[in-house]
Structures are given as C-alpha cells and as structure tokens.
Image (tube, grey):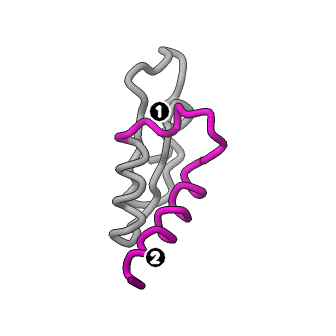
Amino acid sequence: MRKWGILFTPTLVFLPEKVPEDATAINAAVAVMPGAFSKGTTLDLFTWVAERRYELDNGEDFQRYHARRIQERNNVSQK
C-alpha cells in the first residue's frame, strides 16, 4: 500500500493497455477507485474504463460522465 500510495482498501486501480516502464501504477492509472461506492458509481466507472472514454477528447472526465449518467437514469425512472 505504501509503495503505490494507497490509503485504504478496497482500492481498484485501472491501468491502460500499455504502461511506460518507468511509471508507477498510480501515475499510469487511467482511474483509481478508492473504497467502496454505490452500484451506480461502480457501474459507471467500470463502463467509463471499459469504453476507454478517458481517451476521448470531449472534455468529459469521469465526474462529468457519471453526473450525466445519473441524470439519464433519473430521467428514465421519472417516465
């Protein structure tokens, strides 16, 4: 935990397909999920990483993506 700068468990570290040899895991990570989150947040993060949305140049980081997905789910549930 000290080596990677992780403060508590569980912590999920999502790495890109290629990591520079001199990079630490935390520095190379495309996302880090410290702790346990709700199922919606976890699903959104897994989806954001699986779809490689971190590579898009659309200004939508995970927080914006997650906020949009929450709104979309709320809109569907209100119908």
Residue farthest to the front, as pictured: 79
Please tell me whether residue 73 belongs to the stretch shown in magenta.
yes
Q: Residue at x 51, y 60 (%)?
A: 66
Q: Main secondary structure of the magenta part?
A: helix
Nearer to the camera, 34 or 52: 52
- 32 left or right, relative to 42: right
Label at residue 37: none
Q: Amino acid at mark 2?
A: Asn
Other-residue count near label 1 (Cα within 10 Å), few / some / many at <14 / 14–19 / ≥20: some
Specify the quadrant of the image occupied by residue 39: bottom left
Q: Amino acid at mark 1?
A: Ala
Q: Position of residue 50 (x, y in %)?
A: 35, 40
Magenta span covers which residues?
50-79
Pointer 1 residue: 25
Q: Position of residue 79 (x, y in %)?
A: 38, 83
Other-residue count near label 2 (Cα within 10 Å), few / some / many at <14 / 14–19 / ≥20: few
**Of callouts 2 and 1, the N-terminal one:** 1
Rounded to the nearest whole Å, what is the CA distance between mark 2 and mark 1? 37 Å
Compared to residue 35, the image places residue 20 above or below, namely above
